[in-house]
Image (tube, rainbow, N blue to C red):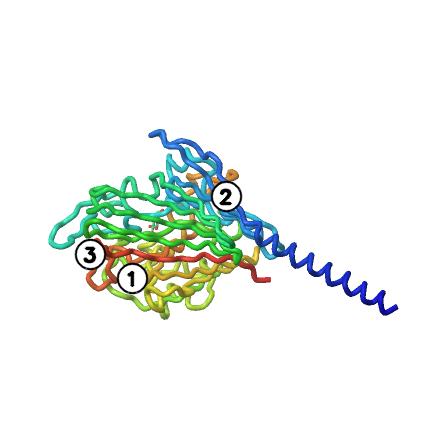
Amino acid sequence: MKLQKFIFLIFILSISFMITNCTREVTIDMKIQKQAFGTTPGGQEVLLYTLTNSNNMQVQITNYGGIITSILVPDKNGKLSDVVLGYDNLDSYIKVTPYFGCIVGRYGNRIAKGQFTLNGKTYSLATNNGRNHLHGGIVGFDKVVWTAKEITEKEVLGLELSYLSKDGEEGYPGSLSATVTYTLTNQNEIKIDYLATTDQPTVVNLTNHSYFNLKDAGLTPILDHQLMLDADAITPVDSTLIPTGEFMPVAGTPFDFKNLTPIGERINADDQQIKYGLGYDHNFVLNGKMGELRLIGKVYEPASGRVLEVLTTEPGVQFYSGNFLDGSITGKNGAVYHRRHGFCLETQHYPDSPNQPNFPSTVLNPGEKYQATTIYKFSVKK
Ligand code: BGC
């Protein structure tokens, strides 16, 4: 009898050992695959990388513009579906895009009248947004082919993208060597590490321009999504969305997102800043210490139960509520992107910093390293 008990115990122990091992195998089952995504008009081959973690979360990234083309994450019932806007094919991204999912550079956001002075010399950039410069110019970092390197280390799955922006490109001084590394973790995080060096003084402000819709990837408006931003102030803008240089406290305004609040609740408020932005299109001055990775934002979408948390080392975030989407774009799976069907949380230095002495500097000198990290972390609330 005792021997039978002993054998039974051994049996149970070996079963639990097998189960533990299986689990371990599941965690190892992260993978990165690549496929052709097309060719640019200039003849450059473009690839599409699919990163899958051990929870089956999947991120697709192309080396054209470093664009995140899809993010599949589970909802509260465990059903995986896409949560970003974009296209199914390269040609559409090349033809027209409101910066879907891309890396924005050399300078994300606006520079007033496309001009700035650095060390006594004035530089002129393209004015591609009314009288201002936006998102790096005519051919910004979103419209170039990046050199891709796959990273597959234990528990780390990543794609390292590099691009050398030549001296004078889009009017910016200095050759800038930029590396953006996307990492997918088993905690359902997309980590983005930005790194840049230069051979002459220049300005730099890199970000990612993903349009999220945690409910249905852009089929319906994002107004029911609840947003929290850890910011006590915004940098108010003029009618052309250039900061006035002031800091405007959010308390008592439609910009107070210190507690989770539906995006749609005050989006049409009778407020001058809301009117200038046609909704939200503003830089929030983040609390906490610039340079330290901290939680700065959270979005909860009640129907799907999906939660997005944003961590960054940056001092600001542009919260853009997709006001300029106008139904003229049909994207993935035939989705028509109407006004406010997606939102962006672009972590960044403040807009027009090269012309604003009171804003944190965006100047990069030779010998210095531009470094920033942002994490988009997905989970569910049941
Ligand atoms: C800007 C918007 C702009 C959009 C372009 C955002 O980062 O803040 O004003 O229209 O990018 O798609």
Residue 211 drawn at (x, y percent): 43, 49
345, above or below 128, in the image:
below
Residue at which label 2 appears: 50
Going from N to C along the chain, the mark reached first, 2 or 1, is 2
Can residue 109 be seen here? The reply is no
Name the residue: 41% across, 64% down.
296
Q: Which mark, by number, is residue 235?
A: 1
Give the amino acid at mark 3: Asn
Give the amino acid at mark 2: Thr
Q: Residue 269's quadrant in the figure? A: bottom left
State the separation of the CA atoms marked 3 and 2.
40 Å
Q: Who is closer to the viewer here, 355 or 366?
A: 366
State the separation of the CA atoms marked 2 and 1.
37 Å
Mark 2 in CB contact with mark 1 (< 8 angstroms): no
Name the residue: 45% across, 56% down.
376
State the separation of the CA atoms marked 1 and 3.
14 Å
Going from N to C along the chain, the mark reached first, 1 or 3, is 1
Q: Secondary structure at mark 1?
A: strand
Q: Secondary structure at mark 2?
A: strand
Residue 54 drawn at (x, y percent): 57, 52
Residue at which label 3 appears: 355
Q: Residue furthest front?
A: 3
Name the residue: 40% across, 32% down.
45
Left or right position of 23 against 197: right
Give the amino acid at mark 1: Thr
Q: Secondary structure at mark 3?
A: helix
